[in-house]
Amino acid sequence: MASVFDYIFNIGGNFTAQISGMSAAAGNFTAQAEVAESRGRSLAGTLASFSYFKDIAQNVADGFNQLSSAGINLDSQMHDLSAVAGVTGEGLKQIEGFARDSALAFGTDAGVSVEGYKLLLSQLTPELGKYPEALSAMGDCIQTTSKLMGGDGVAAANVLTTAMNQYGVSMEDPTAAAAEMARMMNVMAAAGQAGSAELPAISAALQQCGMAAKAANVSFEETNAAIQVLDKAGKKASEGGVALRNVLGQLSKGRFVEKQAREELEKAGIDVVALGDNSKTLKERLEMLKPMLNDSALLSKFFGVENANAARALIQGTESLQGFTDAVTGTNSATEQAAVIMDSYAERQARVNQRFEDLKISIFQATGDFSLWCGVLTSALVPLAQLAPLLTAGWKLMLLIKGLKWATMWSGIVGWVRSAAISIALMNGTLSTSNMISLGFIGNMGRATIGLVRFATVGIFNALKGLGALVLSFVTGGTASAAFSATASTSFGVFATTATAACRAVGVAIMNIPIIGWIAAAVAALVAIGVHFWNTSAKFRAVLKGTWAAFKACFTGIGDMAKQVFGAIGDLIKACFKLDGDGVSAALTKLKAGFSDYGKQMGQAFNEAYEAEMSASEKNPKKPNGKPKGTPNNAGAAIPTVTTPTVDPTGGSLSGASGTGSNSDTGGKIKNITINIEKLVERFEIHSATVGESAEQVKAVILEALTGALNDTQLATE
């Protein structure tokens, strides 16, 4: 049996040197990366230092702001109060002390207490500022009431001052007025606890009926009780206040009641004069109207249709009125409710916090303007710390500029400018003569740039000049027309020259870009390889011709395939509408056959072209260079001589034991033969302006070297 050989080619050369160079380059890159990393760490450390200083300044500024915020707020409130009440000196200091004590007792900010004082001064009388004790007592009432209203001090102040103003409490004796405010506070708190109307609703009702109740000599306790009765009857807040005001107004008419209503009341046994007696309580006067409950017409006539329901609710609810009056009389409901609320964890925590806030106020007042200037300075340090990197870089830049050798640098700049001017002049001269020799990559690019600039300025200007002269030659005559025509011709000539020179310069620059040459060489090499296989491989030619034949068949047969496919689709649609199962099957078969026939045509075209080329190659075999056998090779190709090795490449494995040329024991065995080619080509240089001839030389040298090595090995194994 024939032996099977595996050929292993080891092609040596400068591989080791290239790898060593790559390793050295990688080492240099690593060293540079480490230097960059070190500098990055140094920069990061510097920036971290600046950030640290900025944080210190920011923290100090925040500390001063937090330390002085409570004192600043209180100081602003006290100055506002002084402006409203005209209180200064020791009186103002005393009011401030009361505000701080109130803040400690109720757990609110001292500024809130002062805000309550300002409301009292503005809504009652500024004279209260001259009586700090009374003002403090009223402020405590506001603080206590605010606990019942979710901590809303402004709303609490409005409730209390509304009650005081509606009932006309005298401010001549501020101490007595403060005591009256405390009583009213407890009455309203008790009414809200016993009835359904809360403090805001009571305040809204008192705004409507307070003065009328005071004029009718109805006590504050009984008025609150009546508000609660009406609230339960659906007359809430201000609506209940309006209803109570109207009822009290009708009761107070006395002998001035309308004649018809008076006659009807007397018939019902009601004394009209007694109804207007202010010495009687509201309950007593309402009980006199009990007979009206059985006469709705009289009730509506006396009180009016709009007030009839409210009057009926009050007359029917005299027992409830008395019960509410008793519940709100002589109580400390507000104080007791506030004490329960202030026993919560949040309120106790607020009082503890106010102790620290009071300490801050003391520090603020003790340091005076020191806190002011420290706060301003520390706040100013924050942007300075943030700008520190920029300031440092600017300082270093100034030092660098200062250290520059200006005279030497200026001489260098002048020399560079002169050199550039000379180069530009030479480039311009080259462009004018259109002598486009290669100047190297940088020179070519520079010349192309100057050419484009020259075209964009001189060329375009002359084109415009030529157009203008041409137009003038059309509109003038005689000598002037000839002159303008000559000018136009000259200008157009300059335009054409600059455009041509620019195009040539750009073309030379592009053709001399290294990467363009590499791409051209690569394309030429691929073309040379394709030509080589076309000339030497019948199968390669057969495959290409078969592929081209299949490609043509693809386009020539697409029409027939489309007709058959669309016809099959039409048959399929018809069969579907007719619900014809056999027709559907036939249409699908036709559709499948259309695609199948189309594929067969392309395959048949490929096979025919392939077989034809292979048959032609067998009849007319060619040499490896693509010419028929017997044709001499091109004598111009430089083929290196390959020396046949004198040693046996098989290592004696093919020789028999007896020294004959064959060995029966080697039948069917696989023989591995390794051919070491240290250098395929010792030195190969190409000097040519084109790449076509060079590609042929590369092809010929490599092909002949490999073919010679194979032939020598085959001869040695025969």
Image (tube, rainbow, N blue to C red):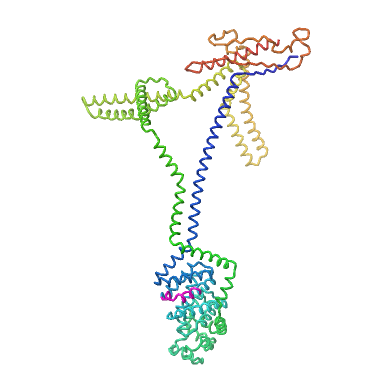
Q: What span is colored magenta in the figure?
A: 127-140
Q: Position of residue 546 (x, y in %)?
A: 60, 22
Q: Would residue 255 be visible to someone looking at this image?
A: yes
Residue 461 higher or lower than 100, as above or below: above
Task: Depth check: give the residue in front, 660 or 535.
Answer: 660
Residue 561 higher or lower than 677, as above or below: below
Query: Residue at point 68% right, 12% down?
Result: 714
Task: Depth check: give the residue in front, 101 or 497.
Answer: 101
Left or right of residue 429: residue 356? right
Residue furthest to the front? 366
Q: Position of residue 214 (x, y in %)?
A: 46, 83
Image quadrant holding the N terminus, namely top right
Q: Position of residue 307 (x, y in %)?
A: 49, 81
Q: Magenta segment, principal secondary structure? A: helix
Residue 396, magenta (yes or no):
no
Task: Depth check: give the residue in front, 476 or 347.
Answer: 347
Residue 114 higher or lower than 395, as above or below: below
Left or right of residue 424: residue 198? right
Query: Residue at point 66% right, 35% down?
Result: 586
Query: Residue at point 40% right, 72% down?
Result: 87
Task: Depth check: give the residue in front, 218 or 533.
Answer: 218
Image quadrant holding the C terminus, namely top right
Q: Position of residue 393 (x, y in %)?
A: 44, 41
Residue 139, magenta (yes or no):
yes
